[in-house]
Image (cartoon, grey):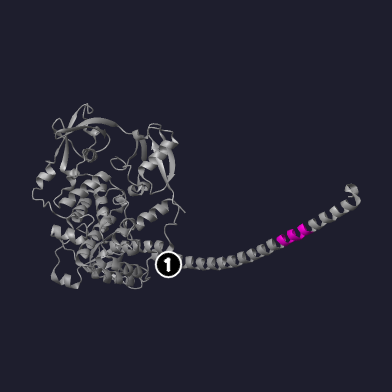
Amino acid sequence: MAVTLWVKVVFPYEQTTKIFGTSPIKTVKELKEMVCEAEQITNSFEYGLYCTSGNGFWMNENQTLISYEIWRQESIEFKKKRIKKVNINYGAETKLIEMNEEEAVSKQIKHIIKEFGLTENYTEFDLFVSENLLDRTKTLLELEIKNIGAAIFKLKRKTGLIFQRSGEMNVGLKPIFGYYLDNAIQRGKREVPVVIEKICSFIEVKGIDIYGIYGKTGVLSKIEDLKELFDKSDDIQIEEITKSPHDVASLLKLYLNELPEPLIPWKFYDSFISSDEIQEIWLKMKKFRTIVSSIPKSNYKTLLLICQHLNKVSKHSQQNNMNSKNLSIVFGSLLLKDPRDSKSSLIRRSTVSLLTKSHNDLDNNQSRNLLHIYSCCQALIDEYEYIFGMIEKNFSEKEYAVAIYDFEGTHEEDLSLIQGDYVEIITKFETNDETESNENEQEKGGWWKVKSLKTKEIGLVPYNYIEIVKDYVPQAEANENNSYRKALTEMDSLKIMLAENIELRTQIQTKKENLLKRIAEFKENLQVKIDQRRGVELIVKKIFGENAI
């Protein structure tokens, strides 16, 4: 069964919206032609599809709809392109080239290079008008250039600040996108790729509270600019290329997706999936810890950095709406990929199936494995400290304690308590690095990480301000256990009812088949009798005449 992708197309000039059904593997041009045919537009070359996500961009007509993850886009507009014919001067040659005023200068440069038949990378060129360098991140409309149709543009070799600053750039460096992880590490002479370090740092400073960070897609032209620059050098200042955290977040997803082998190597995939099937949480986490400790050092260090980073992002979920579950859906199939499905992205295909109400592209086994991938990734984000051997943690059962003294925290990570407050112990023997504790206190346990049962806040408290309470069951957990047991009882009743219902349905089906069989026999006997009567009538008419009957 073919998958149908339903695309909402906005007609801004008519202020109307229409829905078009097409295949996700169709190109943008094919969708545009479908719209033109429906609207009876003959001059289709004057129109285009414009995506309003981020800063907005014109969609490349040669790209497929699935490559744009079109179901994630806020709005797709069908409108006329603002085309100007401009004289472009390159050396001794001049050409009249059509330019879209609503596309970024970087896109115009790529188009001009293609028109002149040049082979150099577009980042090595700049576009000038009246000797003024044009900002490649802006559109021609944003630059507010007057009489653009009559102006002569000059295409010159790149002399901008980005490449002037990087005079020490090694021209012969191998790109990092699409190459193995070790290539980026050896090139940067660091424990993890420089590009990942810079992305994580940028997001944590400028994007950690941005709604939908890592969930929304950035502007493709900006992502391509960042990719090509990082392929040439690690000495790149991201903020000079883009101010949008979504562009930078998309670059991390792109880097991980283009690795020839995922960050968690192929051979560990089955171990992760089988471990996630374990019901006992403590044993599952122990298995994860053992597997992670076995992966190559470079992969281990890089995975740790990403998990630490995503854990920080998840703690701001009230602002960015990206908790560990949402992040695991985004990063699951980027970090942990099925080697049997290496030719295509399982997450992308499943997303298309989900949005188009068709799961025929995924069999039950793939769907189940995808859920295990999400679960593994969520564990890596939430419990990275334990899985990477940074702390010890008791997963087998919860421990509770009660505050025996009032405690007022003096640091951001401290948790203030009032005598009598109950807390859940998360980690024992954790010291507060910023607090000056004497050696005896540290030997006795120092600071413990706990969670307040009243406020649900997590923080550090001195171990000697609380006392462990044995056999304590919080009221909420007791209610939850009762609800769970009640749910199990109801589930058993439903199973019995279902079994009885199946038996009843079987009986009804059998009776139905018997009735249909009897009806068929009756019809057959009736037809025989009718045929016999007709035969008798014919004989009588033949002997006694037509009026005999």
User: Which is nearer the eye, 6 or 118?
Assistant: 118
Report the residue at 27% width, 45% height from top. Answer: 220
Q: Quadrant of residue 93?
A: top left
Report the residue at 55% width, 65% height from top. Answer: 498
Residue 445 lies, with reference to residue 220, above or below; the image says: below
Q: Quadrant of residue 99?
A: top left
Asked whether, in this view, residue 533 is left or right of residue 324, the answer is right
Give the residue type at disc 1. Answer: Asn
x and y percent of residue 460 in the render? Answer: 23, 63
x and y percent of residue 286 in the render? Answer: 29, 72
Instruction: Find the residue positioned furthest to the front.
Output: 542
Dot 1 corresponds to which residue?
481
Tally of numbered tags: 1
What residue range appears in magenta? 519-528
Magenta-highlighted stretch: main secondary structure?
helix
User: Which is nearer the eye, 36 or 6?
Assistant: 36
x and y percent of residue 43 in the render? Answer: 37, 32
Asked whether, in this view, residue 507 is left or right of residue 45, the answer is right
Can residue 504 be seen here? The reply is yes
User: Which is nearer the eye, 491 or 223?
Assistant: 223
* Element class at badge 1: helix
Report the residue at 28% width, 64% height from top. Answer: 383
Crowdedness of circle 1 by 10 Å Cα count: few (<14), some, many (20+)? Answer: few
User: Which is nearer the eye, 112 or 395?
Assistant: 112
Q: Is residue 144 magenta?
A: no
x and y percent of residue 153 in the render? Answer: 18, 32
Q: Quadrant of residue 381?
A: bottom left
Instruction: Find the residue positioned furthest to the left.
Output: 168
